Image (spheres, rainbow, N blue to C red):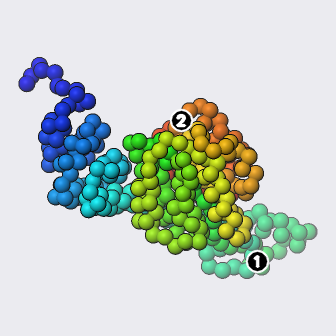
Amino acid sequence: MAGEALPKLDKLDRASVQRLTETAIEFENLPALMSLAKINKYAVVQKLTMENIQRLGRIAGKGGVITPQLYFITRGLLDPKRKRIFRRLARESLLRMSLRIAGQGLRGDIPKRSEFYEPGMEIDLDATIDLIIEKYVTDIPILSPRDLVYIEKRERKKSGVLILDTSGSMMGERNVNAALTAAVAAYAMRRDKYAVIAFNTKAYVIKDVNEDKDIEDIVDRILDLEAVGYTNIEDALKKGLEQLNKIKGRFKWAILITDGAYNQGRDPRPLCKYFEKLHVINLPGKSWGRRVCQDLARLGGGRYVSVQSYQMVPRVLMRVLHSPW
């Protein structure tokens, strides 16, 4: 009624949450459904019938991270059948987002000089001028193709390890962000050797560097990790080094995504000397954790990038992957 104050959302009783849940599903309003789940996930889950979950499937891909976050909050209360279907919707939403972010043609180019032209090559002007000056000391005749230096671009293989912090994520932000980030990396490096590690109290190898694992399986595994409050960066770096040691050749790197506030295991900084390149993407968190992240990047000879929100991480990851060396 006009002039009447609306009840505060956090004061709603179970029956009111259920009625509003039905309305949110009817109008396919994912943000409202997410807000209601934060108030009373038990009431929301009661209304997530098979029919309603399938109905949400029509809009799951348009909701961005809301669908996987909603799955994360309610997953412990769903029976196996509903959980399986809801997880598929969450995964599809993340895969759509990751494919848009990853795009195409991520690999870096390695220029190789050649005096013989082939289609697709470019002229190296600096090298050509140096060659001409060296060959023709007094005068410069009409140049021939043999007087030009060309650049042949070759793709550089990217071999590395992605290390993702999923600790202290009661509302699923870190798990969802980790799943999205891993999917972005998997699309971008689909022809290269890479490993994925997620960690909280301990580290888990989600994808071994020598394993051929579907992106869907990687996302599902991260979405189903438990959300615990402890952060063991030391164990994560040790697992990362184990994976890197399986990779032959040069240009091996690791990208660590964390807030740096470790509260399990020992100080991870002494391990940095064993990495050829350790980049760090610093998640929002405590100031002392930020200092740890800065030290890890400096001691690991890598880049340090700080983000203000979880949403920034996948695109920052793409920038780091463009030039990991």
Can you give x and y, in whole percent of width and height, for residue 104 in the image? 49, 65
Q: Nearer the viewer, residue 260 or 78?
A: 78
- Residue 323 visible within the image: no
> Residue at (66%, 62%) from the top-left corner?
242
> Residue at (23%, 48%) from the top-left corner?
45
Q: On the picture, is 166 further left or further right than 246?
A: left
Question: For the residue marked with disc 1, what is the amino acid?
Answer: Glu
Disc 2: which residue: 285
Give the quarter of the figure containing the C terminus.
bottom right
Q: On the picture, is 47 further left or further right than 107?
A: left
> Residue at (14%, 37%) from the top-left corner?
15
| Furthest-left residue in this view | 1
Can you give x and y, in whole percent of width and height, for residue 93 in the image? 34, 57
Q: On the picture, is 20 further left or further right than 96?
A: left
Q: Measured along the vertical axis of the image, is residue 18 above or below residue 248?
A: above
Residue count near mark 1 (Cα–Cα under 10 Å), binned few <14, some 14–19, many ≥20: some
Can you give x and y, in whole percent of width and height, for residue 71 in the image? 32, 51
Say whether disc 2 or disc 1 marks the residue closer to the N-terminus.
1
Disc 1: which residue: 115
Q: Measured along the vertical axis of the image, is residue 250 above or below residue 283?
A: below
